[in-house]
Image (tube, rainbow, N blue to C red):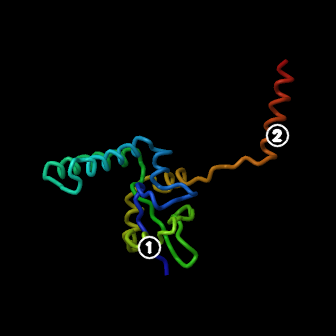
Amino acid sequence: MNKYYKIPMTERIIKVNDTSLFDILLEHYPDLYNREKGRVELQYGIPEPGIMTPQLEEAVNEYNQETKRLYMEQGVPTHIIAIGNNEGVTEYFTHTPIQTSGYDSFLQGREVSRQEAYEYLDQTQNYIEQVSKMFAKKESKSLRKVLVQKVTSILKSKTDN
C-alpha cells in the first residue's frame, strides 16, 4: 500500500540527487531561501528563544504570510509530495528517489492522506514544471562529448585564422 508524504522545501534532512531540499531552494530560488533563513532568525535569533510574545507572534505571522505570497507569486511549491511503498520513496510526478540520510522515521511526521496529497497537488500551480526543473539531474559530461567539443574548438580556431 502506498503512503503519501508532504515535505516542506525547507527540509535539510531530506535529499534529492544528493542535495537537500533547502539547498535546492537556494540553487533555484535564492530569494526564497534567504526569506526562509530570515524566518528562522526572527523566531529563534531573539535573546530568549522559545518565548513567543504576542508581538513576536504577530511579526512571525506577517512574515510567514509575505513568504507564502512570494512562493505563490513565483509559482514555487512550498512542499513536495512523495509517495512511498516497498520499493522506496520517490517524488510523486518525477519519480525521483527521496533520500532520508538514514532518518527514515523522519518521514512519518510528514505522512498525509492520499486525499490531502491530491488536494495539495490540485491547488499548487506549476507543481509539475517546478519540481521537474528543480529535480533535473545534472548532465555529466562523457569523455566522448568532451573530446568532440575540444576537436570542434580546435578546428574552428584553425578555420578562423
**Residue in front for this viewpoint, 9 or 73:** 9
Q: Earlier in the sequence, mark 2 or mark 1?
A: 1
Q: Is residue 107 left or right of residue 57?
A: right
Which-is-in-front pick, marks 2 and 1?
1
Q: Is residue 151 left or right of residue 15?
A: right
Question: For the residue marked with disc 2, what is the amino acid?
Answer: Val
- Please provide percent x and percent y for residue 150: 81, 35
Q: What residue is disc 1 on? A: 105
- Please provide percent x and percent y for residue 144: 81, 46
Check the image and name the residue furthest to the top: 161
Q: Is residue 34 left or right of residue 45?
A: right
Residue at 86 percent of width and 23 percent of height? 158
Q: Secondary structure at mark 2?
A: helix
Disc 1 residue crowd, few under 14, some 14–19, many 20+, Cα 10 Å: few
- Please provide percent x and percent y for residue 97: 56, 65
Check the image and name the residue furthest to the left: 54
Q: What residue is disc 2 on? A: 148
Disc 2 from disc 1: Cα separation: 47 Å
Check the image and name the residue furthest to the front: 47
- Please provide percent x and percent y for residue 88: 55, 73
Question: For the residue marked with disc 1, what is the amino acid?
Answer: Ser
The image quarter in which residue 119 lies: bottom left
Disc 2 residue crowd, few under 14, some 14–19, many 20+, Cα 10 Å: few
Q: Secondary structure at mark 1?
A: helix
Residue 92 showing in the rendered view: no
**Residue in front for this viewpoint, 20 or 96:** 20
Q: Is residue 38 left or right of residue 104?
A: left
Residue at 52 percent of width and 70 percent of height? 89
The C terminus appears in which quarter of the rendering? top right
Residue at 51 percent of width and 69 percent of height? 102
